[in-house]
Image: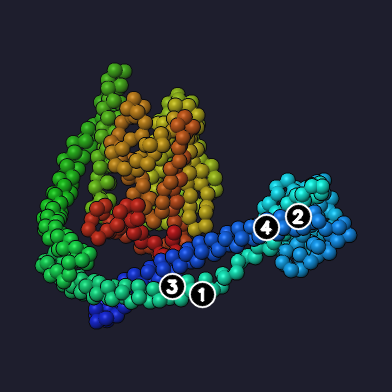
Amino acid sequence: MSTKEQAAWRAEARGGRLPLLPIAPLVVALIGIATAATIATVAVTQLQATSDESAGLRSKALAATIAARMRTAPPQGRQDLLADASRRTGAAFLLVDQEGEVLVDELSARLSREEVAGFLTKAEGAADLDGDRMRFAASTVSPPLSHLSVMAFVRAPSPPVGTVRLSNAVAVLTVLLLGVAVAVALIFTRAARDDVAYVRRRIADMARGGSDAGVAHAGPMPLRSLDQVGLLTAALNNLIQRFAMAEDGYRHDLRAAAQLDTERSQFLAGLSHELRTPLNAILGFSHLLESEDDGPLSPSAREALGMIRTSGEHLKSLIDDILDLSAMETGQLRLSRVAVDVRRVAEDVVAEVRATLGKRPVAVGVTGETGLLAWADPRRVRQVLTNLVTNAAKATAEGSVRVELRKDGDQVVVTVEDSGRGIAPEVLSTIFEPYKQAGDAAARRGGAGLGLAITRRLVLLHGGRIEARSELGRGSTFTIFLPDESYAGHVPRDSLVPWAEGAEGVETPSEIPTPLPPRWP
């Protein structure tokens, strides 16, 4: 931990603000405000409902009263009666017949005959007239004027009267209650903050210790409280004890794994020497016999020698794959980088694979740009392309295998596409793992399942990447991206790549560090 970080921790422990301090009061304030807003909304809604109900009752009473007086009023006095009632009560009135025809109008809004008829049918209710909320009621005049009706319209204000006073009262009460709640929350939160600061300070002291005196050997922390922070401290003490046990076991297992890895490397080196010596002798003598320098061979003998030679070369390729994988895992693989003509390498690989097809109806060819130079190890580029093209040819009973080359910015892109049997989606995600082979057992040909694993790691060691797409019955496509010759000044010509899968302090293969400059994606 740096000096600046230590000073920040000490400042927080002496009373600086932790993120925990404002959270509880803020939550209390938000809950209080939300509760007050809810109460105010419910109260205003209820007040509005009460105001609407009062306006409705008033409109019914006015309509009935004016209807009763209308029966005794002379025809020429009906206009004056409604005008006087409107002036005294503040309501608006209409005298209409049963067909909705307005006979006397003391309403500022102009209603159509259909609207009046609709109001008569409802007898009472609510209406919006020129932006005003109104409650209306209709009352039929007594005989002999039963064909006439009086309609009374009473304003229902929105917001209702008293809304401002109610809102002010709720606001004052909210402020008082929030003040008390926030003060209590601050007191409890500050106490919890002090306990958390103590725990953090102890953890910082543990982290500042050496590798042998860190968290695992710092001892338990004392309990300062019996609340949730106390439970956290107890759980942390239990975790420290378990971590100490796990750390001891990890160090023991790490030493054992390092010893096993050393012994495995020594075993593979010895095995390589012991297997290669007799295998080279077998291959050498088989070539000597096939040359027929000591006399002609019978057809059966020539066939038997061919089988011996083919089996020996296959065994040699398996040994080479195992040794290559071991060298990459132990970080002993050296790359000798030069400007590689990828087109020429691809054409050589295609020519070799084409010769192994026999009479199978498979067309193998190279297309795309020429003169593409990659900054890579030519031997390893050839190994990568051989693995991909050979696998494509094995997976294609009839059809085509195409190698396409192109330039993409500062990358050389090589695509190997076949029209073979394809790879199932559930298998596609594992094909780059060691000892994994795609397809069923009957369709697989000889091999240890290391080709694609080695291919991927070689591409990563060059600072490139590899992608795979496939669909059952429609073939597969593998695409590799290699740095072009513009990286010649950034990467040593003969570089040791310090990488081993699973080594301590080294990232996983999917995020392997490359010796390329930062501008490489």
Q: Which quarter of the figure is the N terminus placed in?
A: bottom left
Identify residue type, mark 4.
Answer: Ala
Foreground mark, 1 or 4? 4
Alpha-carbon span between mark 3 and mark 2: 49 Å
Identify residue type, mark 2.
Answer: Ala
Question: Residue 209, percent across and down?
Answer: 16, 72
N-terminal of the pair, mark 3 or mark 2, is 2
Alpha-carbon span between mark 4 and mark 3: 40 Å
N-terminal of the pair, mark 4 or mark 3, is 4
Alpha-carbon span between mark 2 and mark 4: 10 Å
Q: Residue furthest front?
A: 72
Foreground mark, 1 or 2? 2
Point out which mark residue 168 bears.
1
N-terminal of the pair, mark 1 or mark 3, is 1
N-terminal of the pair, mark 1 or mark 4, is 4
| Residue annotated with mark 2 | 67
Alpha-carbon span between mark 1 and mark 4: 34 Å
| Residue annotated with mark 3 | 174
Foreground mark, 3 or 2? 2
Point out which mark residue 61 bears.
4
N-terminal of the pair, mark 1 or mark 2, is 2
Alpha-carbon span between mark 1 and mark 2: 42 Å
